[in-house]
Amino acid sequence: MDYLYVPTPPAEMEPELVQEVCELRLRERHRVLDQDLHDKVQAAMVGLVRDTEIVPHRTLDFGTGSGESMDVLSAFAPRVVGCDMSLNSLIACRRPNTIVVAPEGPLPFAADVFDLLHALFVMHFRVPTSMLRELRRCSTTDGFLVANCYGSSIVPYREQMTEAGWTLAESRVVPDLDGHVVELWRPT
Ligand SMILES: C[S@@+](CC[C@H](N)C(=O)[O-])C[C@H]1O[C@@H](n2cnc3c(N)ncnc32)[C@H](O)[C@@H]1O
C-alpha cells in the first residue's frame, strides 16, 4: 500500500504500533500513499457491495482514518458514521459524524444498528477479536461487512473474523493487484 517500512508484519502489530504507523502515514500521506492502489481496492469494494443488491440504510466506516471513503459510502446509505482509534486521524478527517474508539472496543452503538460495515485497509492489521465481535454485535442480522486484505495478513484476519462470529460469503481478487482480496462477510 505504501512505502513506509516497518519490520513487524502488520498482522502481528499491537494496536499502539498500528496507531503510531497510521499517524505517521497520515502526516506523510501525500508522499507515501499509493493512491492508484487505494482507488483500485476501493473500486473493488464498491463493486462487491453493488453486486449484493442490498441497499444499506446505516453504514459504519470502521477505521475511517482521514475519511477517504466517506463520500463513496454516502452514495450507498443516507447515514454514514466513521470510527477510528486515532483521534489525530479524525481531526484530519474533519467530519462531524465520526467518533474515536478504543482499539479493542467496545463500540458506542446499540446492537443491530448497521446494515453495512466497511473496513478499507484496516484488516491487514491485527484488529483485536473483541473489536471484531463488537462489529458483529452492531451489525443487523441480515447486514454485511465488506473489507479488504492482502498478503500474509489474509489467513490470520480470516481466522479472527470466523472466531468473532462472521462467515465469509464471498471473496474476490482485486483486478491487476496480486495478493489483494476484497471480501464480504455475514453474521454467522
Ligand atoms: C491504513 S489506515 C486506513 C484509513 C482509511 N480506511 C483509508 O482507507 O484511507 C487504517 C486505519 O484503521 C485504524 N485502526 C486500525 N486498527 C483499529 C482498531 N482496532 N480500532 C479502531 N481503528 C483502528 C487506524 O487508526 C487507521 O486510521
Image (tube, rainbow, N blue to C red):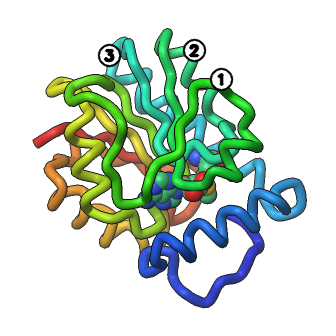
Asked whether the viewer can see residue 154, the reply is yes
Determine whether label 3 and label 2 are within 8 Å by CB: no
Q: Which residue was labeled with disc 3?
A: 54
Residue shown at the point (68%, 38%) measured from the top left: 68
Residue 7's place in the image compared with 26, above or below, is below
Q: Residue placed at 16% from the left, 39% from the top?
A: 187
Q: Which residue is mark 2?
A: 75
Task: Indicate left or right for 77 with 155 as reference.
Answer: right
Separation of disc 3 and disc 2 at Cα?
Answer: 13 Å
The x, y position of residue 62, in whole percent, is 46, 43
Q: How many marks?
A: 3
Question: Which numbered marker is on residue 107?
Answer: none
Disc on the earlier residue, 1 or 3? 3
The C terminus appears in which quarter of the rendering?
A: top left
Is residue 74 shown above or below 29? Answer: above
- Residue 3's quadrant in the figure? bottom right
Instruction: Please report contact status of discs 1 and 2: CB closer than 8 Å, yes or no.
Output: yes
Give the residue type that dot 1 points to: Asp
Check the picture and name the quadrant holding the N terminus. Answer: bottom right
Look at label 2 and name its amino acid. Answer: Ala
The location of residue 23, given as percent across then percent down, is 70, 62
| Residue 41 visible, this orientation | no
Residue 179 position in % (x across, y down): 50, 65
Disc 1: which residue: 71
**Residue 15: image location, x then y, percent:** 48, 70
> Is residue 101 rendered to the left or right of residue 159?
right
Crowding around mark 3 (Cα neighbors within 10 Å: few <14, some 14 to 19, many 20+) is: some
Q: Which residue corresponds to the image point at 56% horizontal and 70% vertical from the top-left?
A: 18
Label 1 sits on a secondary structure element that is helix
Q: Residues within 10 Å of mark 2 (few under 14, many from 20)?
A: few
SS state under label 2: loop
At 41% across and 27% down in the image, what residue appears? Answer: 49
